[in-house]
Image (spheres, grey):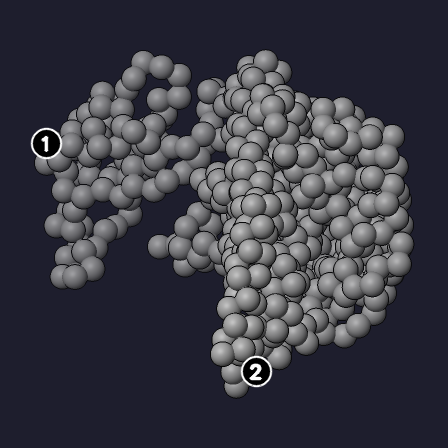
Amino acid sequence: MKLVMAVIKPFKLDEVREALTELGVQGLTATEVKGYGRQKGQTEIYRGAEYAVSFLPKVKVEVVVDDAQTDSVVEIIAKAANTGRIGDGKIFVVDVQSAMRIRTGETGAEAL
Amino acid sequence: MFRHTKKAVAGLFAAAAVMFAAVPAMAAVDPETAYVFNTFSFLFNGALVMWMAAGFAMLESGLVRSKNTATICLKNIALYSIAGIMFYLVGYSLMYTDVSGYIGSFALFYNPSDAELTLLGAEEATSEMVDAVVGGRYSVASDWFFQMVFVATAASIVSGTLAERIKLWPFLIFVIVLTAIIYPIQGSWTWGGGWLAEMGFSDFAGSTIVHSVGGWAAVTGALILGARKGKYGPDGRVNPMPGANLPLATLGTFILWLGWFGFNGGSQLALGSALDATAMAIVFTNTNLAAAGGVVAAMLMTQIMYKKVDLTMALNGALAGLVSITAGPDLTNHFMSIIIGGIGGILVVIAIPLLDKLKIDDVVGAISVHLVAGIWGTLAVGIFGAGMLGVQIIGIVSIAAFVIITSSIVWLVLKYTMGIRVSEEDEDIGLDMVELGLEAYPEFGRGSQRS
């Protein structure tokens, strides 16, 4: 099992969710985060003084999937979250040691 | 028969007297009606000014950070209450009763007049009792109420500037002294009929007497208290700390704008005649135009200076316009109000970054709005209105000196006895948790209850 972790632009969340649902992915977790990459952020002026908005609001989407599905999930997310403009985000894939569904106690692939 | 004749003759004389009296009396309202309208004006306009306390609370809540929001709300409602109590206990008498040039009288508690008590307590009211009350031209309590909301306004100006790092109780002790002693004494010099009034100093609703007084107390407090931690960096760097809730700040400004109609309008001090009603309408109109001028001027200034319009400066611009017209809102040429308010708006946009350059940390811009525009508004009466510029300057300077000295003494005494500033660590955590043990937004942002 792999954890696919994607940091995307907030307004892309619904598109990504729909795309994943079409693929058959049955759950995901979304968190509001802030971050920056090479898109540095900008300088604004508040009451005559400059302030750097270094962090930009993003959303982190996390899905745990079977090894076999991982590549297609990454591809689907990348396509849905893409705007072509700076700040689109990144996708990471991490190994998952185990998984369990809390209600039933199912483990492994059954829990996904 | 003689009795009836006497009565008839007396009746004829009375009728003739009334008829003769009626000719010039057509220009005057029946005294009891005038009394009712005057009293009503004080009560209704005073209630509008009371509503400005809500305006200040919302404006300040919107411009401080969320970790300090509950504290600023508490300070606002507390100072309004304290001001009312102190003004009842000693303040009103110190300002208005038997003013001898520089000061009124020390008298505890201000209660209805004897004539009023007689009328209220009588089994059957006689016309003498009514006349005795009506002769006062307005109810004693209504005048107290109207003047009380003004001292409360002056006190609330101070809370905005000193937000986010001042200790609660020392601040409230300062408010006690400001509202019991400092404000009433300088107020007696003009509105109490003292030496400035005799000189011809003209401040219709209080650009100097209310707004600059609050402004000076705020400046001395800001200097003695110091800036917020991290606000100013090396090499003149200024670190903005954006407010938590701009819609609240906007709401607060609109509330203040509405309340200001009472603030300026009620300062006509009468409504019992066509003249007074007309004058009050002119004052309402000028008040609105000046605020509008302030907003537009501030917007244009920020657009030109920063390439983007700053909402918080536009809000301050409205208030600066209002403060600017407060000394002379009775101008018969309304156009001048737009100019006066507009200049106030320009001054406030310049003053805000200027204060930062001087490292005077004014969280909400109260000094720029109330002190700077207050001075401008008082001078404007000498330039555009019926005042004498030289006398206006004397009033501005003398009240400035008095408030600077007295407020500095109080701040310094508080600083070196109980301390006025929270610790650095407490300032980081936020006053809400440290002083109140509360969160303003526990379920939002970084609130502890956010799920």
Quick one: B215 or A12, which is closer to the camera? B215
Give above or below for B379 relative to B413: above
Which subunit holds the residue at mark 2?
Answer: B
Residue B22 visible at all: yes
| Residue labelled with disc 1 | A22
Q: Which mark is residue B285?
A: none
Look at the numbered disc 2 and give the secondary structure of its residue.
helix
Residue B386 x %, y %: 74, 30
| Place of residue A3 in the rendered image (x, y in percent of width and height, measured from the top left) | 28, 39
**How far is the residue under mark 1 from the one under mark 2?**
83 Å
Quadrant of residue B243 in the image? top right
Chain letter of the residue beneath label 1 in the structure image:
A
| SS of the residue under disc 1 | helix
How packed mark 1 is, by other alpha carbons closer than 10 Å (few <14, some 14-19, many 20 or more), is few
Amino acid type of the residue tagged 2 in the rendering: Gly
Nearer-the-camera pick, B373 or A60 = B373
User: Which residue position holds label 2?
Assistant: B121
Q: How many numbered marks are there?
A: 2
The amino acid sitting under disc 1 is Glu
Are labels 1 and 2 on one chain? no
Depth-wise, is mark 1 or mark 2 nearer the camera? 2
Query: Could you classify mark 2 by the number of other residues whose Cα lies within 10 Å: few (under 14), some (14-19), or many (20 or more)?
Result: few
In the image, taking residue B441 as reference, residue B273 lies left or right, namely right
